[in-house]
């Protein structure tokens, strides 16, 4: 009797598990915690996105964390031109840093009409009252199979130096102060 019951359960659950397996999407995650960074804003980022097909929605979850105990964390968000945001969001966000609040979440939903590797770029700035510190981040969004997307788009997204080393190009903010003689 037990063998029949187990077989029936397996037969009933098999289509469900098969369907769930077909709908499963690959998750892409990353983090800057415990990674080398140039001196700048004391901000770290972790993210999680979904590898999706063309015209499918990818949830993008970004978490920013700072070791600062006070000040303001400003975030300027830009999305690649062919990546469409499905949620209205403020592209210039500010968070008040408090000893009890040092982690901040940004949730987006995006999709693209063609296969490719797209980026959501963040330019963070912390101002603690004695001059702003900056740090930039890029969150990748894969539309299509990641192996195909990487091979196809790597050369179009990178610039090569004379030494053959590839670099990516991101936005930055530069401040120039002119000192007056006394």
Image (spheres, rainbow, N blue to C red):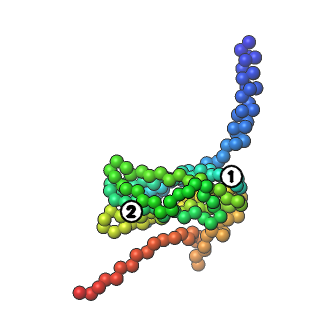
Q: Secondary structure at mark 1?
A: loop
- Quadrant including the C terminus: bottom left
- The quadrant in which residue 156 appears is bottom right
Q: Are marks 1 and 2 in contact (CB under 8 Å)?
A: no
**Which residue carries the number 1 mark?**
56
Q: Position of residue 8 (x, y in %)?
A: 75, 21
Q: CA distance from mark 1 to mark 2?
A: 35 Å
Please report the residue visible at 56 percent of the width from the left and 71 percent of the height from the top: 169
Between 179 and 160, the one nearer to me in the picture? 179
Numbered mark located on residue 148 in the image: none
Disc on the earlier residue, 1 or 2: 1
- The quadrant in which residue 161 appears is bottom right
Question: Crowding at label 2, few (<14), some or many (≥20) Cα neighbours within 10 Å?
Answer: many
Using the image, determine if residue 15 lies above or below residue 45: above
Using the image, determine if residue 50 lies above or below residue 167: above
Q: Secondary structure at mark 2?
A: strand
- Quadrant including the N terminus: top right
**Which residue carries the number 2 mark?**
126
Left or right: 17 with respect to 96?
right
Confirm whether residue 34 shows in the render.
Answer: no
Q: Position of residue 35 (x, y in %)?
A: 46, 57
């Amino acid at each position: 009797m037990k063998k029949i019951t187990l077989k029936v359960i397996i037969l009933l659950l098999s289509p469900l598990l098969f369907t769930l397996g077909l709908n499963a999407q690959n998750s892409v995650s990353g983090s800057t915690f415990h990674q080398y960074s140039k001196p700048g804003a004391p901000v770290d980022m972790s993210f999680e996105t979904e590898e999706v097909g063309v015209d499918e929605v990818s949830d993008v979850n970004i978490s920013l964390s700072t070791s600062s105990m006070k000040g303001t964390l400003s975030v300027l968000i830009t999305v690649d031109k062919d990546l469409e945001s499905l949620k209205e969001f403020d592209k210039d966000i500010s968070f008040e840093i408090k000893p009890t609040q040092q982690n901040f979440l940004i949730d987006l939903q995006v999709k693209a009409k063609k296969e490719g590797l797209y980026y959501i770029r963040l330019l963070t700035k912390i101002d603690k009252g004695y001059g702003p510190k900056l740090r930039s981040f890029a969150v990748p969004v894969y539309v299509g199979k990641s192996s195909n997307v990487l091979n196809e788009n790597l050369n179009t997204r990178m610039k090569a130096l004379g030494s053959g080393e590839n670099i990516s190009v991101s936005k930055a903010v530069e401040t120039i102060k002119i000192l007056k003689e006394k």
